[in-house]
Image (cartoon, rainbow, N blue to C red):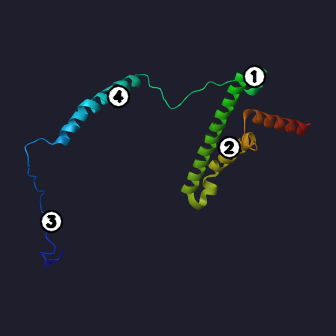
Amino acid sequence: MPADYDKEAYPEPPRQTPVVDKQTALPNPALILSKVFYYAVDLPVTTFRDAVDSIRSKNKLVYYHQKFRRVPDLTECQEGDYTCYYEAEMQWRRDYKVDQEIVKVIQERMRACQQREGASYQQNCAKEIQQFNEVTKSFQSRYGDLGAYASGRKCLMKQKERMMAAQAQSA
């Protein structure tokens, strides 16, 4: 600010924060309620949670990864064994989701490389592009053209037709 400004129009701000004058001798009810809440609710819950966490840290299991045992394929199920059919179908669906995530991860890597390299991505990202092409080709050969109601049985039939076509082509 210039030295010759109007001091009445623009007064200088106070240099220190003024001290609040206490008007009453009674304690603040908000402070009392916050202390009551802390000792009645927060402290016991936090103590209990710390105790549980210390117990869980001893047997450290990653709780968000559920591990499933591999079950027999549809081809290995006995005729009329519907529980085996169901387990094989659920296994196929898990495999399908895992394969979808693999394709997504490879695609993200390829796109990150393209973004990083800019115009010269063709030569600098050749490995990622080739890996993406291989993964999408294998995903398409296994799950492509199954439609919206894809199932393990349909996938197995598609694999059988592909094997028969390869046999007919080689003969």
* Secondary-structure class at tag 1: loop
Residue 99 found in image quarter = top right
**Alpha carbons under labels 3 and 4: distance apart:** 48 Å
Amino acid at dot 3: Pro
Closer to the camera in the image, 168 or 86: 86
Residue annotated with mark 3: 13
> Quick one: SS at disc 3?
loop
Q: CA distance from mark 2 to mark 1?
A: 29 Å
- Estimate the spatial distance between the alpha carbons at disc 4 and disc 1, rounded to whole Å: 47 Å
Return the disc, 1 or 3, that comes first in the chain's sequence. 3
Tell me the distance, in whole angstroms, between the alpha carbons under discs 1 and 3: 84 Å
| Front position among marks 2 and 1 | 1
Q: Secondary structure at mark 4?
A: helix
Which is nearer the N-term, disc 2 or disc 3? Answer: 3
Residue depicted at x 58% and y 55%: 114
> Marks 2 and 4, Cα distance to the nearest angstrom?
45 Å
Instruction: Name the residue tied to disc 4.
Output: 49
State the residue in front, 99 or 147.
Answer: 147
Residues tagged 2 and 1 counted as in contact (Cβ below 8 A) = no
Name the residue type under label 4. Arg
The residue that appears at 11% across and 56% down in the rendered structure is: 18
Residue linked to disc 2: 135
Q: Residue furthest bottom?
A: 4
Residue 77 shows which numbered tag?
1
Could you tell me which secondary element the residue under label 2 belongs to? helix
Q: Residue placed at 65% from the left, 47% from the top?
A: 132
